[in-house]
Image (cartoon, rainbow, N blue to C red):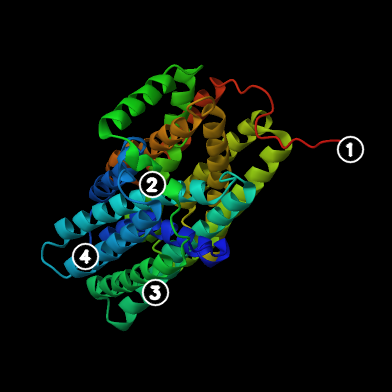
C-alpha cells in the first residue's frame, strides 16, 4: 500500500476538478458566442450541461459499485481527456454544433463522475473529511482552476486568434488539444501518486443494485419528512435565481459589441476583468463569508449576505446604462459583483449543511447539491431568450426586480441556534 503526502496529489486533484466545471460554465459559452450563436441558443444548449450534477444524488449510488474510488478518479480523467480531444476535433467539422455539444455533454458527465469519486476518496483518505484545512485547500485550488479557465485560457485563445487572423475554430482547437494533454498527464500522475486502495475502498461493491435503489428511496422519503421542508426547498431553488440568470448573460454582455448593447471587450480583456479580477473577488467573498459566519453564526449573517447578492445586479444595471469604456472601472465592478456572489454562495452552502442533519445527513447533503444544480439549470434555459427579447438593459433591470425572490425565500426561513459559529472554550 502506498501512502504519499496529500500535498503531492491533493492540489492537482482539486485543480483538475475545477477545470471540468469551468469548461461547462464558461468555455462552452465562449466558444458558441464567438461562433455566432444567439444568446437564446447558447443558454438553451449549455443549460443541459448541468444535468449530470442534478441527477448526481441518484447516480453516485451506482458509480462506485464495482470499482475503487482511485480507479474511477484516474478513469474519469482519461475520459475527460478524450472528450476534450473530441471537442477540438469536431470544431473543425461542418457539424461542429452537434459534435461539440455531444463532447461537452461527455465532459459534464465525466466531471460530475469525477466529483463523486473525489468526494468518496476524500472520505476514505482523510479522517476528518469536513475539516477546515481540507475544505480550504480544495476551494483554493478549485478557484485557481476557475482563474485559469475563465482568465488565462480565454486570454490565450484571444491572442492565438490575433496571430492566426481570427481563425476562431482553429484557436479553440489548439486550446482543447492542450487540455487533452493536461488531463492525460493528470491521469498518469494520479495513477502513480494517489494512495493505493484499502480494503475499505470496495465496501460498496458488496451491495446489490436493488439494495441501493431501496436505500436511495428511503433517504429521499426521509428528506421530504424534514422540518420546514417547503421554506427550505424554496430557499434552495430561488436564492440563486438572479445569479443563475446573470452568469451566462454577463459573459455575453461584456463581450457583445456596443451596437447590441454590450461593452465590446476583447477575449483578452474579458479574461482579465472576469477571469482574473472576478475570480479574486469570488475567492475573497468566500473567505470573508466563511470568517464572519464562523464568528457570528449563520442566523446573524444570513440577511447581510442576502443583501450582498443584490449589489451585483445594481452594478449590472449601471454598467448597461452608462457603458463605461475604462477597463479599470469594468474590472472594479466585476470584482464587487463576484465578491457579492461569493458571499451569497458561502451562506447558501452553510444553509445546506444546516439543513442536512440527522441520520441521513450525508445523502441529504447530496440531494441539496442536486437541488442547487437544478436551481442553476432551469433559469439558464430561458436566460438568453429573455436577453434577446428585452435587450441587456431591461434584462438587468428585470434581475434587479427578481432579487425580491431570494429576500422572500430567506424571510420564510427560521434558523435556530448559532449554527456555524465557532465555539471557543474558556480555559
Mark 4 or 2, nearer chain start = 4
**3D distance between C-alphas at marks 1 and 4:** 61 Å
Q: Secondary structure at mark 3?
A: helix
Q: Please tell me which of labels 1 and 4 falls first in the chain.
A: 4
3D distance between C-alphas at marks 3 and 1: 55 Å
Q: Please give the residue where the numbered disc 3 appears in the rendered image.
A: 156
Q: Of circles 1 and 4, which is in front?
A: 1
Using the rendered view, name the quadrant where residue 388 is placed. top left
Q: Earlier in the sequence, mark 3 or mark 1?
A: 3
Q: CA distance from mark 2 to mark 3?
A: 42 Å
Q: Earlier in the sequence, mark 2 or mark 3?
A: 3
Residue located beneath label 1 in the image: 427
From the image, state whether disc 4 or disc 2 is nearer to you. Answer: 2
Q: Kindly state the secondary structure of the residue where label 4 is placed.
A: helix
Q: CA distance from mark 4 to mark 2?
A: 32 Å
The label nearer to you, 2 versus 1, is 2
At 47% across and 37% down in the image, what residue appears? Answer: 400
Q: Nearer the viewer, residue 137 or 38?
A: 137
For image coordinates 44% across by 69% down, the residue present is 152
Q: Secondary structure at mark 2?
A: helix
Q: Secondary structure at mark 1?
A: loop
Report the residue marked by disc 2. 202
> How far is the residue under mark 2 from the one under mark 1?
44 Å
Q: Earlier in the sequence, mark 2 or mark 1?
A: 2
The residue lying at 63 percent from left, 48 percent from top is 132
How far, Cα to Cα, is label 4 from label 3?
Answer: 20 Å
Q: Residues within 10 Å of mark 3 (few under 14, many from 20)?
A: some
The C terminus is located in which quarter? top right
Whether the residues at callouts 2 and 1 have beta carbons within 8 Å, the answer is no
For label 4, the residue is 86
Amino acid at each position: 500500500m502506498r501512502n504519499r503526502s496529500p500535498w503531492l496529489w491533493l492540489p492537482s486533484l482539486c485543480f483538475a476538478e475545477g477545470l471540468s466545471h469551468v469548461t461547462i460554465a464558461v468555455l462552452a459559452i465562449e466558444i458558441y458566442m464567438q461562433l455566432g450563436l444567439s444568446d437564446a441558443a447558447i443558454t438553451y444548449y449549455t443549460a443541459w450541461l448541468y444535468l449530470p450534477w442534478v441527477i448526481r444524488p441518484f447516480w453516485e449510488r451506482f458509480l462506485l459499485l464495482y470499482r475503487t474510488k482511485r480507479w474511477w478518479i484516474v478513469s474519469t480523467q482519461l475520459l475527460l481527456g478524450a472528450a476534450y480531444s473530441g471537442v477540438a476535433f469536431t470544431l473543425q467539422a461542418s457539424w461542429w454544433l452537434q459534435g461539440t455539444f455531444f463532447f461537452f455533454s461527455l465532459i459534464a458527465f465525466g466531471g460530475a463522475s469525477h466529483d463523486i469519486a473525489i468526494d468518496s476518496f476524500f472520505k476514505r483518505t482523510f479522517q476528518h473529511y469536513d475539516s477546515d484545512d481540507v475544505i480550504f485547500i480544495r476551494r483554493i485550488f478549485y478557484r485557481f482552476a476557475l482563474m485559469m479557465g475563465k482568465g488565462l485560457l480565454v486570454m490565450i485563445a484571444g491572442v492565438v486568434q490575433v496571430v492566426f487572423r481570427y481563425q476562431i475554430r482553429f484557436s479553440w482547437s489548439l486550446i482543447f488539444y492542450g487540455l487533452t494533454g493536461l488531463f492525460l498527464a493528470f491521469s498518469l500522475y494520479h495513477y502513480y501518486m494517489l494512495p493505493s486502495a484499502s480494503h475499505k475502498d470496495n465496501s460498496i461493491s458488496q451491495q446489490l443494485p436493488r439494495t441501493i435503489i431501496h436505500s436511495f428511496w428511503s433517504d429521499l422519503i426521509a428528506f421530504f419528512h424534514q422540518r420546514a421542508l417547503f421554506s427550505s426547498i424554496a430557499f434552495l431553488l430561488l436564492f440563486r435565481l438572479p445569479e443563475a440568470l446573470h452568469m451566462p448573460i454577463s459573459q455575453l454582455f461584456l463581450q457583445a459589441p456596443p451596437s447590441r448593447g454590450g461593452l465590446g471587450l476583447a477575449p483578452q480583456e474579458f479574461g482579465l476583468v472576469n477571469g482574473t479580477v472576478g475570480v479574486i473577488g469570488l475567492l475573497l467573498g468566500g473567505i470573508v463569508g466563511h470568517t464572519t459566519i464562523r464568528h457570528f453564526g449563520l442566523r446573524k449573517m444570513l440577511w447581510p449576505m442576502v443583501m450582498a447578492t443584490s449589489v451585483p445586479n445594481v452594478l449590472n444595471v449601471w454598467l448597461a446604462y452608462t457603458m463605461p469604456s475604462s477597463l479599470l472601472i469594468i474590472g472594479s465592478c466585476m470584482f464587487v459583483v463576484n465578491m457579492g456572489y461569493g458571499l451569497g454562495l458561502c451562506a447558501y452552502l452553510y444553509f445546506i449543511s444546516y439543513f442536512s442533519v440527522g441520520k441521513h445527513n450525508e445523502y441529504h447533503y447530496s440531494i441539496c447539491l442536486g437541488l442547487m444544480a437544478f436551481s442553476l439549470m432551469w433559469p439558464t434555459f430561458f436566460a438568453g431568450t429573455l436577453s434577446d427579447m428585452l435587450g441587456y438593459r431591461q434584462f438587468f433591470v428585470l434581475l434587479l426586480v427578481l432579487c425580491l425572490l431570494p429576500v422572500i425565500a430567506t424571510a420564510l426561513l427560521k434558523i435556530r441556534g448559532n449554527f456555524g459559529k465557532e465555539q471557543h472554550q474558556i480555559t
